[in-house]
Image (cartoon, grey):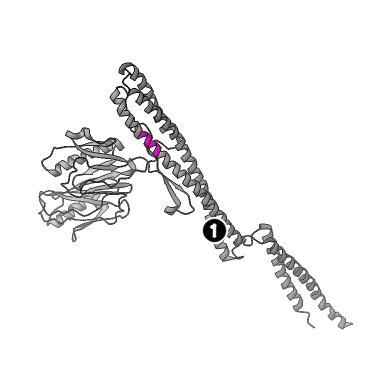
Amino acid sequence: MRIQHNIAALNANRQLGINNNAVSKNLEKLSSGYKINRAGDDAAGLAISEKMRGQIRGLDQATNNANDGISLVQTAEGALNETASILQRMKELATQASNGTYQNAVDRDNISKEVTSLKSEIDRISTSTNFNKINLLDGNLKDYKASTTNIANVTVTSPVATPSTAVATVGLSGTPGASSVEIKYFDGKELKTANIDFTSTGVAGTNQTAFSDAVALNTDLASLFNYDASTQTFTSKATGTDAPQIMSIANKSGVSGVTQGTLTPGSKGTETINFSNAAAMPTEGQTLTIAGKTYEFRSAATINSVSAGNSAVVIDEIGADAAAKKDNTFHNLVNVINSNLGAGAATYTDATDIMTIDASKLGGKGLTLQIGANVSADQQVSLSIGDMSAKGLGIDKISVATQDDAKAAINTIDDAINQVSGTRADLGALQNRLEHTVTNLGVTSENLTSAESRIRDVDMAKEMMEMTKNNVLAQAAQSMLAQANTQPQNVLKLLQ
């Protein structure tokens, strides 16, 4: 018999600790309702469960997002319902004024007062209709983009490709001296011009050395580009969407052999229109659609035959050749675009025959509703609403002052009614889609919650059964520990 090490007691104590620990875990699971309370309970199950939780919470918020989108759409459509009623009344008044039984100075003047008032109310509705302080009908939610045009030798790129490294070949073959080269470059924000003067201080030597030295003296160019005299190329020091680029290199005097690099100009948020044929000029009736507005090319002689709803562009005949006429034409186009869309929306570069449309100047870019738990395109939906003001509907200049004016107003108002009805149809279709989205998100969230429950939730009945077993084992181990502790006392009997 040994008394220094009570092996039986040690074993009973160890089993008691195990059973007590098991009971503790049973109590934790039963009190929390989860069978996974820490990573040690089930590492793989915890990882799967956490991913499911993230998706479920994302889906639940996406449901709220979709419901908010439905509320926004209903707000816009409700306002347009009244706009449609106003347009119907305006058509009624225009039809009335078209009748020959009314006098211009008296009857039609009184009719005009109501027409003017109704136009003002349409404007008020367009500017005051908002959701969470987001204006809905003033054109800020219009998703502007340039669209393909039928003008010969013209391509429209939307959006512009992201620039990478910009390279332009110089290829100078002239000699130094009273020579200069004009370089147009994009600095990441705007188009700039640098004149490289070969007679500048410190510029001397061979043609290439002189040019290289001149580039180095221009601090703006040197800060944006690396110039390699051996390959005669400019390379942008930065890459990305707004990377600096050389747009063109042209000889101004005393230099020959300058070649233009093949680059795609533009920056983030712009759309470029490239006129690939320097001598190309649009012909009568050709159109260019930009930001939802169509511009029709007409000569001064046929300017009155422009199609309804299009903005006329006069083809200026000034210029000695086709290229000069073309440049004048597109400068006129830029002026008309800027007058319609806002100053600075369009620019045209003669040397490169490139028209750039700055999308940031065209108003809003629409709304994107997040209707899923991820950022993929199929879990987002775009909302676009055009300008529903009197000007946006094309009725700002209608008149019923004369019988002919009133007749013309009928067609214009009909077009406005169709535009409003089309917008309301788009909103109604989107609302129906979002309602289906809400239903789908709810079903998906429910199924994922059920799956997550099977992984993480505890089976209460099973766990109670386990706790009962572990409680019995713990009590038995405690009893056996007491028995084991009494065994060494038997040694005392040997001393009697």
Q: Is residue 6 visible?
A: no
Horizontal relation, residue 8 to residue 365: left or right: right
Q: Quadrant of the N terminus?
A: bottom right
Q: Amino acid at mark 1?
A: Met
Q: Name which quarter of the figure residue 350 lies in.
A: top left
Count of residue discs: 1
**Residue 107 placement (x, y as % from top left):** 34, 18
Does 310 appear above or below 199? above
Frontmost residue, 420 versus 323: 420
**Residue 22 placement (x, y as % from top left):** 69, 67
Magenta region, residue range = 416-422
**Residue 480 placement (x, y as % from top left):** 79, 73
Horizontal relation, residue 385 to residue 232: left or right: right
Residue where numbered disc 1 is placed: 52
Frontmost residue, 132 versus 448: 448
As helix, strand or loop, the secondary structure at mark 1 comes to helix
Frontmost residue, 396 versus 354: 396
